[in-house]
Image: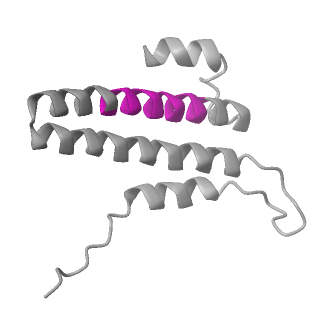
Amino acid sequence: MLTFLLRRFAPDMDSADSPAARLRCGMVAAALGIALNALLFVIKLAAGLLSGSIAIIADAFNSLSDASSSLVALIGFRLSAKKPDPHHPFGHGRLEYVAGLVVATPPSSSPPPA
C-alpha cells in the first residue's frame, strides 16, 4: 500500500538526490502514519471501553503517541524544505535531523512523589 501511495503522490521517489522527491516521500509517509495511528487509536479505545480492558485503552494511547511522532516528522519535513533566507543561507535541511532527534528522545522520567 505504501508503495502504491508513493508512486501516486511522489512519482519521482526513486531520485533520492531530489529535495522535492524527498519532501513528497516524507510527507506521504508521515501523513499515512498519522492517519493510521489515529484510526488505530479510535478502534483500540472503543474496544477497550467496550471490554473494560485498561490494557487495550493504554495501547490506544500508545498509538496516539505514535501519531504524534509522525506529526513531528511531518513538521520536520515541512520546515526543512523552506528556502534559504538571510539568517540561514544554506537552507533549513538540518531540521530533518532535529525532528528525528525529537522523535528518538525518550520522555523524561521524573522521580515519583514522596
Percent across and percent down for residue 27 are: 59, 33
Whether residue 5 is in magenta: the answer is: no
Question: In this picture, which residue range is highlighted in magenta?
Answer: 25-41
Residue for point 15% across, 27% down: 50
Above or below: residue 13 compared with residue 111? above
Between residues 12 and 73, which one lies in front from this camera angle? 73
Above or below: residue 60 compared with residue 104? above
Q: Quadrant of the N terminus?
A: top left
Residue for point 35% across, 42% down: 64
Above or below: residue 109 compared with residue 14? below
The rendered magenta stretch, by its main secondary structure, is classed as: helix
Between residues 45 and 111, which one lies in front from this camera angle? 45
Q: Is residue 43 left or right of residue 113?
A: right
Whether residue 29 is in magenta: the answer is: yes
Between residues 84 and 109, which one lies in front from this camera angle? 109
Percent across and percent down for residue 51 are: 10, 29
* Colouring rule applied to residues: one colour
Residue 7 location, quadrant:
top right
Q: Is residue 21 left or right of residue 43?
A: right
